[in-house]
Amino acid sequence: MKRRCEACEQTGHMNVHHVRTLAELGSPGPTQPAWAAVMARRQRKALVVCDTCHDHIHAGQPTTLTA
């Protein structure tokens, strides 16, 4: 197991960000957050992220994606 944040590649304590359906990720385009675009592209309803990125996602703030 990689044990790295899928957004920023940091190690440490990880959280899994879930959505109920892929439709919740919104439409592709400039208004879709980068983390949602990655989940949609991978067709995954979960994304493993560090505490900081998880907090940013829930606060509606941008995350730094290296994936």
Image: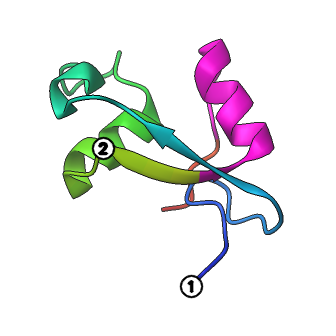
Q: Quadrant of residue 26?
A: top left
Name the amino acid, label 2.
Lys
Q: Earlier in the sequence, mark 1 or mark 2?
A: 1
Is 28 on the left-hand or right-hand side of 4?
A: left
Residue 51 percent location from the top left of the image: 77, 43
Q: Is residue 30 above or below residue 39?
A: above
Q: Is residue 9 above or below residue 37?
A: below
Quarter of the picture containing the N terminus is bottom right
- Residue at x 51% of width, y 40% of height: 17
Left or right of 65? Residue 56 is right
Task: Report the residue at 30% width, 44% height from top.
Answer: 45
Q: Position of residue 23 (x, y in %)?
A: 16, 24
The residue tagged 1 is 1
Amino acid type at mark 1 = Met
Q: Which residue is mark 2?
A: 45
**Mark 2 secondary-structure assignment:** loop
Region in magenta: 49-63
User: Badge 1, how many Cα within 10 Å: few under 14, some, many 20+?
Assistant: few
Q: CA distance from mark 1 to mark 2?
A: 18 Å
Q: Is residue 60 above or below residue 15?
A: above
Q: Inspect the magenta stretch and tell me whether residue 16 lies in it.
A: no
Q: Main secondary structure of the magenta part?
A: helix
